[in-house]
Amino acid sequence: MSNSRRDFLWNVGGGLGGLAVSQMLAHEAMSAEHDRPQPEFNGGLHHRAKVRRVIQLFMTGGASPMDTYDYKPELEKLHGQKLGPDKKPEGFTAMPGALMKSPFPFKQHGESGRWVSSVFPHQAKEVDQMAFLMAMASKTNVHGPGTYMMNSGFLLPGFPSMGAWISYGLGNLTDELPTFVVLPDAKGLPYNQKGPFSAGFLPAVNQGTVINASGKNPIPDLFAREKYQFATRDADRDGFDLLRKLNAGHAEKQPGDSLLDARIKSYELAARMQLSAPEAFDVSKESAATHKAYGLDAAVTEDFGRRCLLARRLVERKTRFVQVWSGPQGATGNWDNHGSIPKELPPIAMSVDQPIAALIRDLKSRGLFDDTLLIWTTEFGRTPFAQGGDGRDHNGGSFVTWLAGAGVKAGVSYGHSDEWGYKAEEGKTYCYDFHATVLHLLGIDHKRLIYRQNGIDRRLTDVHGHVVQEILA
């Protein structure tokens, strides 16, 4: 949209009204930037989409596979034997100890017979809805680079996250809410802070919108505080008129600055969210039975349960991509169980188990699984040998991811790790394959979703990646 057209809208509509009308016409400019999803592709960009919305559940710290989903009876036989590396591998925080069996009993569940440990009694009942990638691997044993890799496909900062790529490639499903929403743990942000939901070199408008779900006002400054009596509608109009003039001057000097366009669009979105957001984030409207199902009545599950419920409410209202994080960065309160697997893993597992199972059942009962993809993952796994007493160290050699919902072949698994769970042995999948598969379900060919940056055609999957057809319906 030209500056003169936007100025016209401002002068006619003024204030928030002008912002909202401006955004409607801004779709013309978006269409000119790059191809948009086609109706004949069911919302997909390159082929027919089976998924339109995504919820990603990210377990910060490296969830231990052999204590959750990757049953290793060989560890029981070899428990206590020093068969691991005799030197400290790169990325390990201490010398490796003896092989350590899981302290938690495993049982088979569902028609698929999936082995699940006792730390996930609720998710165990839903395994027939899931498709497991049992041989995921990372190129690093370090949290920061590992978290970047699982979110952006690169070990270094500065690259767009998967949510940003999806926002860029497909755009929004609604004008009333953000396209990419991030719901971090109440205890804090994950490793790399806001880096894992960055837009990188993509237009800034594609970055994740961080929502403080535990706060009194989840979206800060959406409304003026009561003590600011001067913040009236007339004052808004005058302020926005001055801002328009400043932005217009900046745009003339910096025509390639996507931050300016992102700011303008954020104001436009804020105007609409003053009407839509209070209802969308008000979980008190849900029934008592729903609150109980998600664990909002118990301290251990309240935070993650609330955010899972919000994720459902957001995708129900057509938010494209919602990311829910379990655990902050740091040595405690997450899945980084160096100190003691028996003591540290059960509390964090309990905090997510019931809410995740409730989310699966809720999505199914509301028909949202018809076009919504649910993902559970982490940045890497943990060692089959002990660290210190009964903890486990970082391990990029093998970890587990599962997917459920639209386009997924329920109750199957692909790949497996070795008999200890130390390395991916068959069907190894990296973040590139995971990302390619998610994009494929959204109707995107990962090799064709490209953004030229500094003379290089960049992709979420870099120069790698294949779609894991074995887990697709």
Image: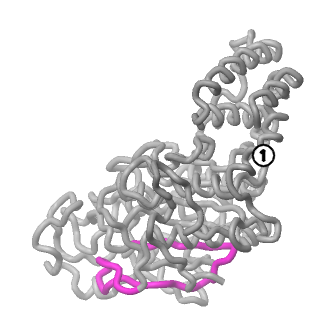
Q: Which residue is mark 1?
A: 27
Look at the image and tell me whether residue 137 can be seen. Answer: yes
Residue in the picture at 64% in, 68% down: 444
Residue 473 lies left or right of residue 378; in this view the side is: right
| Residue extending farthest front | 455
* Quarter of the figure with the N terminus: top right
Residue 318 is drawn in which quadrant? bottom right
The x and y percentages for residue 378 are 44, 63
Q: Is residue 368 placed above or below 469 in the rendered structure?
A: above
Q: Which residues are magenta?
A: 399-426
Residue in the picture at 25% in, 88% down: 77
Q: What amino acid type is highlighted by mark number 1? A: His
Residue in the foreground of this view, choosing between 290 and 416: 416
| Residue extending farthest left | 86
Residue in the picture at 50% in, 77% down: 466
| Residue extending farthest top | 230
Mark 1 packing: few (<14 Cα in 10 Å), some, or many (20+)? few
